[in-house]
Amino acid sequence: MITYDFDLKIFYSTLINDDIFFGGFGTKALGDGRNIDTSINFFRENIPNFKTIVIPEQIHSVNVTTFSANLIDNVERVSETDGVITKDHNSVLTVITADCSPMMFVDKKNGIVGISHQGWRGSVKRLGQRMIKKIIEVGGKKENIMVAIGPSIGQCCYDIDDERYYEFLEEFEVFADKIFHRHKGKLHLNLALLNYLQLKEIGLPAKNIDHFPFCTCCDKKRFFSFRRDKKIEYGEMLSFIVKSV
Ligand SMILES: [Zn+2]
């Protein structure tokens, strides 16, 4: 279940958060995720042994990096990657999004956490499935992996052109009935559902997946949205996950 924490101004998944694992999907109220000082202050206040914030470059790739902290820096940047996994304690994995779909992963039994950012490019190339494979490579087990899919643009607001439609159709014809909808003569894509179906396709049980009922573009009060605000100033939401001690 996805729940809101009024004090921290984040949404979180009850599949993920407990005494050791702490993940969150930030809101507008938390501030612009591109502001690293805001993020560091938040982690210092809320993670007792906060060590490092891990910031992937986010180039709309399907590259996944296994991260291990060097114990020196508070800020570690990972180049050319959109997915990060770690077995570290207190290294906070982050992504920023404004309409794209953030996902967080945890295998509690094997002590692995992960985070990824998928816009249309990462979704069409199955980044979520690559994350699962990478977690298994470092010792995770499919039946233990829990995933929370964060706030992204809903199918209500995500219309796509023909070129994009055929690109998705070629890859996901089997899901076509579920992920495409026609609205006022335009084709719309359900990005979050597509990512959910990919997780099911690779063998994750439905009970291991939490997902979001909101649309970043519709919900102006809670979320930043690139599509809605690109002509004016827009921000990005911070998402994070950490295994603490
Ligand atoms: Zn919408």
Image (spheres, rainbow, N blue to C red):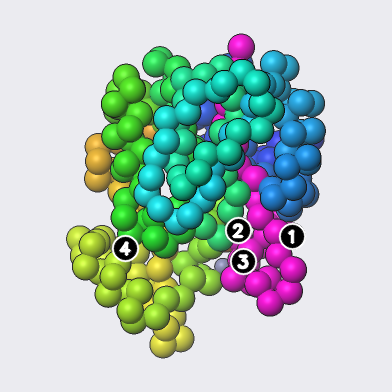
In the rendered view, would you say 118 is above or below 114? below
In the picture, the disc for residue 98 is 2
Task: Specify whether 45 is left or right of 27.
Answer: right
Q: Disc 2 or 1, which lies upstream in sequence?
A: 2
Q: Are marks 2 and 3 in contact (CB under 8 Å)?
A: yes
Residue under the point 27% across and 75% down:
166
Q: Which mark lies nearer to you, 3 or 4?
A: 3
In the picture, the disc for residue 178 is 4
Which type of secondary structure does the marked residue at label 2 adopt? loop
Residue interval drawn in magenta: 216-245
In the picture, the disc for residue 226 is 3
Q: Are marks 2 and 1 in contact (CB under 8 Å)?
A: no
Q: Disc 4 or 2, which lies upstream in sequence?
A: 2
> Amino acid under label 4?
Lys
CA gap, disc 4 and disc 2 = 23 Å
In the rendered view, would you say 229 is above or below 191? below
> Amino acid under label 2?
Ala
Residue under the point 73% across and 74% down:
232
Q: Which mark lies nearer to you, 2 or 1?
A: 2
- Quadrant of the image occupied by residue 168: bottom left
Which type of secondary structure does the marked residue at label 1 adopt? loop
Q: Which mark lies nearer to you, 3 or 1?
A: 3
Q: Are marks 4 and 2 in contact (CB under 8 Å)?
A: no
- Give the residue number, with chain letter if any, for mark 1: 221
Task: Specify whether 234 is left or right of 54.
Answer: right
- Ligand 1's image quarter is bottom right
